[in-house]
Amino acid sequence: MKQLRTLAFLAVSLLVFPWVSPAIAQTPQPDATLTLAQAERVAVDLRQGMTVDEVQKLLGKPRRTALRSDGYSPNAPSKGTLQWTYSWSSTSAQGSTQGNLRVEFVSKAQEEWYVNSWEWLSH
């Protein structure tokens, strides 16, 4: 009886395992996988008007975020800005280099953020 339970468990595990492993293999990589040089190349594709989702696909999740508001009115879209900061570091024979990219979004409608500007803060 114990062997039958063990065999049943193994059979169910083998049926479920192929469905679980592809999902695990497709887990998105964090933005830390980009090197500073790769980030510089990818950042060239930033454009005004890009959505938050488009920027996240391009650069990954930001390291820091900030929200600045000019005041709140429930009837009007925000006039504030959303800032995302990305950080990368690189070590070479010449020394260590830090790269910080800040992307600034503006809102055209509630919860709809679009790239307004970006800049490398230190390089």
Image (tube, rainbow, N blue to C red):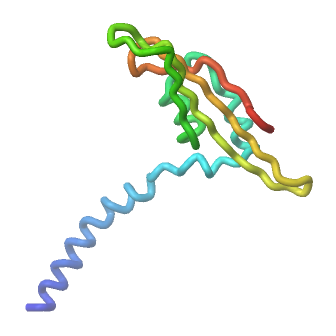
Which residue is farthest top?
A: 75
Q: Is residue 120 left or right of residue 56?
A: right
Q: Position of residue 79 (x, y in %)?
A: 49, 12
Task: Tell me residue 43's x, y (percent).
Answer: 68, 32
Q: Quadrant of residue 23?
A: bottom left
The answer to which image quadrant residue 1 occupies is bottom left
- Residue at image position (73%, 45%) is 36
Comparing 90 with 100, the one in front is: 100
Where residue 38 sits: x, y (%)?
Answer: 71, 43
Give the answer, above or below, for where 68 lies relative to 87.
above
Q: Position of residue 9 (x, y in %)?
A: 19, 78
Vertical arrangement, residue 83 with respect to residue 38, above or below: above
Going 45% across and 53% down the picture, which residue do you hit?
27
When the figure is inspected, residue 2 is found, relative to residue 116, above or below; the finding is below
| Image position of 115 (left or right of 17) | right
Identify the residue shown where x is 44% and y is 52%.
26
Q: Where the C terminus falls, by quadrant?
A: top right
Residue under the point 70% across and 46% down: 88
Which residue ends up furthest to the left in the rendered image? 1
Which residue occupies the foreground of this view, 57 or 11? Answer: 57
> Which is more toward the observer, 74 or 7?
74
